[in-house]
Image: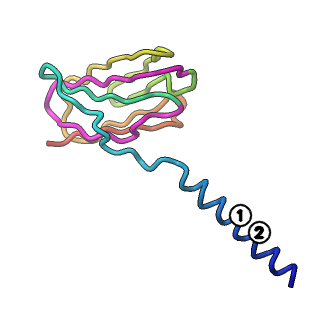
Amino acid sequence: MKTTIAIIISVLIVGGAILFLGNSKQPHEENLNNVSIVDGKQIIEIKAKGGYSPERSVAKAGIPTILRFKTEGSFDCSALVRIPSLDVYTVLPNSGSKDIDLGKPKEGVLSGSCGMGMYPFQINFGN
């Protein structure tokens, strides 16, 4: 009987820890008001530190667009941005911001990642 109770308690503790740790990650941060229009240009702001936040953004196609990376003490591989389809491979400052001019993007998904490919991000351009 004591063994059975100990097993049940152990299962509850382990199960609770798994549920807690599984939910401690933030859900995909989609469309968190990180896109704005300033002086006729669309600005997409993405924070870079231990990955990219938000990982997914939604923006309008066909208007002049700036992709702005903001960093604050970023010393990991997210400080190196790759966007293969645009032949972009650039180093971000450890703290500050860096703009990448995307021109007037067409409809579709623009994908990028850190230098090692571990931290991806996407921008869905639509109408």
Image marks 1 and 2: residues in contact by CB distance under 8 Å: yes
Report which quarter residue 96 is drawn in.
Answer: top left
67 part of magenta stretch: yes
Residue 125 drawn above or below residue 37: below
Residue furthest right in the image:
2
Residue under the image location 43 percent in, 21 percent down: 89
Residue under the image location 54 percent in, 55 percent down: 23
Would residue 20 appear left or right of 81 to someone viewing this image? right
Amino acid type, callout 2? Ser
Q: Which mark is residue 14?
A: 1
Residue 69 drawn above or below residue 126: above
The crowd level at tag 2 (other Cα within 10 Å; few <14, some 14-19, many 20+) is: few
**Magenta-tinted stretch:** 50-74
Q: Main structural element of the magenta stretch: helix, strand or loop?
A: strand
Report which quarter residue 105 is drawn in.
Answer: top left
Q: Secondary structure at mark 1?
A: helix
Front-most of residues 57 and 118:
57
Q: Quadrant of the N terminus?
A: bottom right
Residue 58 drawn above or below residue 18: above
| Residue 90, percent from left and from top | 43, 18
Would residue 30 appear left or right of 127 to someone viewing this image? right
Mark 2, residue position: 10
Q: Which mark is residue 4?
A: none
Residue under the image location 32 percent in, 26 percent down: 86
Amino acid type, callout 1? Val
